[in-house]
Amino acid sequence: QYFPDSMKSHLSHDIVLLCVECKQRSNQAYHHFMVCLGSKYNAPLEGGGEDQVKRYTVDEEANAARASARALTHYSHRMPNNRVTEHKQVLLEYLRSEFVSEDDLARCCSLEVKSEITGYVSHGERVVEALTKSSPSNKCTTDQYPELESFVKEWRLYFVESMKPSHLPEHWRIENRVSNSSALMIDNNLELSGFYA
């Protein structure tokens, strides 16, 4: 979704139907490839690992309050008294109050505990940005984004080598052109707006 329109308008060429088992295999293979791309383009994947970047920050106090409110709302009737007391205490501390009303309970059940980290840039956006930095922005040609062309073909090759498909469409080729010349508009203001294509 971060590609320029001229490279997305006929990507049905790269939409291939997979069975459930092959889809699982492809996910594992693609994850490995994306980790490699992350290292190559300084574009870590989203997640909690050391080599990953976090998209959201979590308000732990609000998260605990929400969990306690939901537990009390749905399961208090079958909880031991000491657990009910513990959950109420979490809410009292969060609310800075001495009493938890029904309205408080309902509000805490709906707390938003995640917020997007300022300046977060997704893995896909970083990769496409790196690949388009050197591309001319004032030409309307089929090779306007040569790095992206090569990138898509690299993915196609990886797909063939890792999945070894036996039922590809008759005219499917790794080297088929990516840019659609009939839809090529001058992407002067290339808006990087999510996975590669």
Image (tube, grey):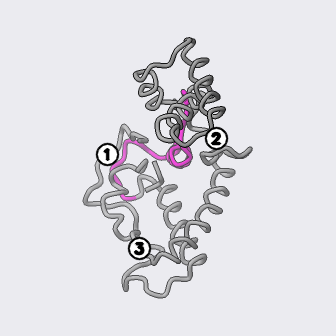
Residue 132 part of the magenta segment:
yes
Which residue position holds label 1?
A: 186
Label 1 Cα neighbours within 10 Å, binned few <14 / some 14-19 / many ≥20: some
Question: Which residue in the rendered view is the most extreme toward the left?
Answer: 182
Which residue position holds label 3?
A: 16
Q: Quadrant of residue 19?
A: bottom left
Residue 138 part of the magenta segment:
yes
**Residue at position x 37%, y 42% from top?**
138
Sequence-wise, the earlier of marks 1 and 3 is 3
Could you tell me which secondary element the residue under label 1 belongs to? Answer: loop
Could you tell me which secondary element the residue under label 3 belongs to? Answer: loop
Disc 3 residue type? Val
Q: In which quarter of the image is residue 29?
A: bottom right
Q: Please tell me which residue lies in front, 169 or 86.
A: 86
Sequence-wise, the earlier of marks 3 and 2 is 3
Q: In which quarter of the image is residue 11?
A: bottom left
**Residue at position x 46%, y 26% from top?**
105
Q: Is residue 173 left or right of residue 118?
A: left
Disc 2 residue type? Val
Could you tell me which secondary element the residue under label 2 belongs to? Answer: strand
Q: Position of residue 22 (x, y in %)?
A: 52, 77
Sequence-wise, the earlier of marks 2 and 1 is 2
- Give the number of the mark in front: 1 or 3: 3
Gap between marks 3 and 2 measured at Cα = 30 Å
Disc 1 residue type? Ile
Location of residue 28 with respect to 195 vertically, above or below: below
Gap between marks 1 and 3 measured at Cα = 29 Å
Label 3 Cα neighbours within 10 Å, binned few <14 / some 14-19 / many ≥20: few
Q: Is residue 30 left or right of residue 177?
A: right
What span is colored magenta in the figure? Answer: 117-142
Q: Could you say which disc has been placed on residue 53 in the image?
A: 2
Q: Position of residue 37 (x, y in %)?
A: 63, 55
